[in-house]
Image: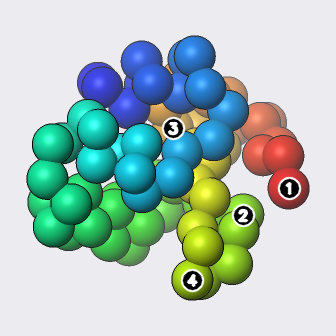
């Protein structure tokens, strides 16, 4: 639910933003990896500098939603 609220106010999320939600860097990385495996956020950045956007159908975005690249 926190990510749905976050993405209602923000278009993108970086690891440091997610870390602000979870409070711990290692916990943020674990959750980001899990969520990426589930296909919920998409990385529109490069692997070493990821920028995440919600995948279509997740976090309040419609299935027709096209993330900004």
Task: Report crowding for label 4: few under 14, some 14 to 19, many 20 or more residues within 10 A (C-alpha).
Answer: few
Q: Which mark is residue 58?
A: 3
Task: Report crowding for label 2: few under 14, some 14 to 19, many 20 or more residues within 10 A (C-alpha).
Answer: some
In three-dimensional space, the C-alpha distance between marks 1 and 3, rounded to whole angstroms, equals 17 Å
Secondary structure of the residue carrying tag 1 is: loop
Q: Quadrant of the N terminus?
A: top left
Residue for badge 4: 48
In the displayed structure, would residue 11 be above or below residue 31?
above
Residue 67 pos. (x, y %): 78, 46
Secondary structure of the residue carrying tag 2 is: loop
Residue for badge 1: 69
Mark 2 or 4: in front is 4
The disc, 2 or 3, on the residue closer to the chain's N-terminal end is 2
Mark 4 and 1 residues: CB-CB less than 8 Å, in contact? no
Secondary structure of the residue carrying tag 3 is: loop
The disc, 1 or 2, on the residue closer to the chain's N-terminal end is 2
The disc, 1 or 3, on the residue closer to the chain's N-terminal end is 3
- Residue at 84% from the left image edge and 46% from the top image edge: 68
Residue for badge 2: 44
Mark 2 and 4 residues: CB-CB less than 8 Å, in contact? no
Residue extending farthest to the bottom is 48
Q: Which coloring applies here?
A: rainbow
- Residue at 67% from the left image edge and 33% from the top image edge: 11
Task: Report crowding for label 1: few under 14, some 14 to 19, many 20 or more residues within 10 A (C-alpha).
Answer: few
């Amino acid at each position: 639910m926190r990510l749905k609220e976050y993405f209602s106010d923000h278009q993108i999320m970086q690891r440091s933003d997610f870390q602000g939600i979870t409070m711990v860097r290692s916990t943020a990385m674990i959750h980001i990896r899990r969520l990426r495996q589930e296909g919920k956020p998409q990385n529109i950045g490069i692997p070493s500098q990821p920028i995440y956007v919600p995948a279509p159908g997740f976090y309040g975005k419609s299935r027709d939603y096209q993330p900004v690249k």
